[in-house]
Amino acid sequence: MGKRYTDAWSAIVDLLVANGVDTCFGLPGDDLELLRALDRAGVDLVPCRDQRNAMYMATGYALQSGRLAVCALGKGPAVTHAATGLLEARESGAPVLVLAAGVPERRRGGGGFQELDQVAVTAPLVRWAHRVGHPDRVVPSTVTALTRAFGPPPGPVYLEVPDDVRTTEIVFSGPQPTLPEPLVLEPGPVTSGPALAAIRASRRPVVLVGGGMRHRNADGVVERFAERLGAALFTTASGRGAVDEYHRLFCGVAGLYATAPAQELWSSSDLVVSLAGRLEETVVEGGMPWPPVPVVQVNVDPGGLSAEFPGPRVLGDARHAVLGWSRALDEDRTAGHTDAAEVWANAIDVARKVMSLEVEAELARAATLPGIRVAELLAALDATAGEPRVLVQENGLQDMWSYCFPYHAGGGSIVPSEQTPLGFGAAAAIGVKRAAPDHEVTAFIGDGAFLAARADITVAAPAHGGVLYVVLCNGGYGWLDAQRARLGLDAERHPFIRPGAPPPVVDGTDIHCRVLRDKSVLTEEVLAARRACAQGSTAVLMVPVAPDDICPPLRDAEVVPQ
């Protein structure tokens, strides 16, 4: 029953394959034995030029697929360079296993090459960080890492294999350990309590869907709950893609990115039901102040339950809670509130219609302006998109247009967490495409983000193409420039952008690259790019944008929030 492995990487890769892993992202150090082990096992390595991008790719893969992603690193500065990606994976709740090399035990404290207490560096950024101190611990430690990555709650884990351990023969006696078997419970009746009482009493409810509902909304249980409750349906930015954006109750992203009709609807609600989301700053502030109403929170992660809001907090699976509450409402013959429900349903319908009219007005305004405006670009992307599709986003001044419903609707969505690291979407799109090769994958990003991931985009193109990059070019960082202008600082002394600067050029026979300036050929150029992607090429559309092309929620507030 036992197994003998030539080195630690062979043992670890064997466990990964047994648990369904077929892809690894990363940039290993000198320990290329890992590549040999991956090759022998038939696991594909997506090679990276930057450890941050490797982590972003792995995070995108995990978020899109719901499966474990694996990222391989070297030691010392390779680990610190990946720290930003670890932070993003943790905040996004992405199950990522990070495999890193380490200085051998005999060198620790003696000036070993690239020596660093890597566990101390990574521990605050992951669910679990561990250094394997002995060959006998390789297999058990790997199984523990996989278990911790899947959670609940899911998140990144860090496993360090020192040089003296990774090169040692591993002998494991007994059967190969397996991951814990999940106990799938059929949701039963929900006992009456504060949460159900608040839901039953509500006349103008809002359901807010967080990122934790990704891959937990099979069969549209959230939409059916919203229908039964008669609730307006919003998401957090991270929750985007968890629900059907064409649903008649969907009103967009809450908080900072909500348009004026959605803000008005939200402010008149009498209950918020928050499902598997953290009530972070961008959700609860911006142009959309919360009314003083109860907030029913449900989250499987205690750390995701905020103590800042009045109302019941429920520790548990949000999917099970929704199913249980729906059943309780179905069994409650007195919970109709017919008159109030009709008034609220009308208010939701009116808000959605006004938002659609505002989009039409914005597009009409854009048509009178020179150059391609972001609203026109998003409309062209929607009009040319097929199914299934995924939009991968950044979080800069102009690319935040894509957060504002209904300027983009339908399809899946991958967004950065509230940490919003530069370049996340640009690199994550490669991981998303690997996870969903049959999907159209569009990355909607700024030129700063594109430059941060450019090397990896170019390297990935020949073997892992198929991604359409739409790059909004203002020659720098539009968000910072808007802050500069708000404070009246001199643009020449603080040149955060270079208006009129030529967009960055990307070369390669596997890359379809165009600069778009002419409105009249916009749709034609997008269609040509999509055809190139369908044939396996990477397509890059560079679109110069005006500094004043700001999405309505921010523009209408007449201030760029800090």
Image (cartoon, rainbow, N blue to C red):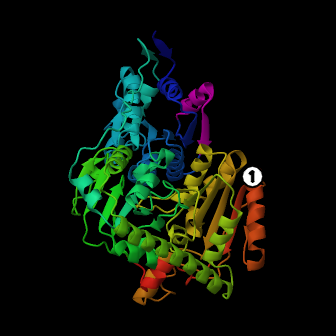
Q: Is residue 321 left or right of residue 430?
A: left
Callout 1: few (<14), some (14-19), or many (20+) C-alpha neighbours within 10 Å?
some
Percent position of residue 172, x then y: 42, 15
Quadrant (top left, top right, bottom left, bottom right) of the C terminus: bottom left
Q: Is residue 367 left or right of residue 136?
A: right
Which residue is pictured at 50% across the width and 45% down the height?
219
In the rendered image, residue 296 lying in the magenta stretch gets the answer: no
Residue of label 1:
534
In this view, the residue in front, 252 or 68, is 252
Percent position of residue 372, x then y: 67, 79
Q: Is residue 505 visible?
A: no
Percent position of residue 158, x then y: 39, 40
* 419 up-or-down from 186: above or below: below
* 145 up-or-down from 278: above or below: above
Percent position of residue 362, x then y: 59, 82
Q: Amino acid at mark 1?
A: Ala
In this view, the residue in front, 334 or 282, is 334
Label 1: state its secondary structure.
Answer: helix
In this view, the residue in front, 40 or 63, is 63
In the rendered image, residue 35 lying in the magenta stretch gets the answer: yes
The residue segment tinted magenta is 31-47
Q: Is residue 35 visible?
A: yes
Asked where in the image residue 108 lies, by quadrant, the reply is top left
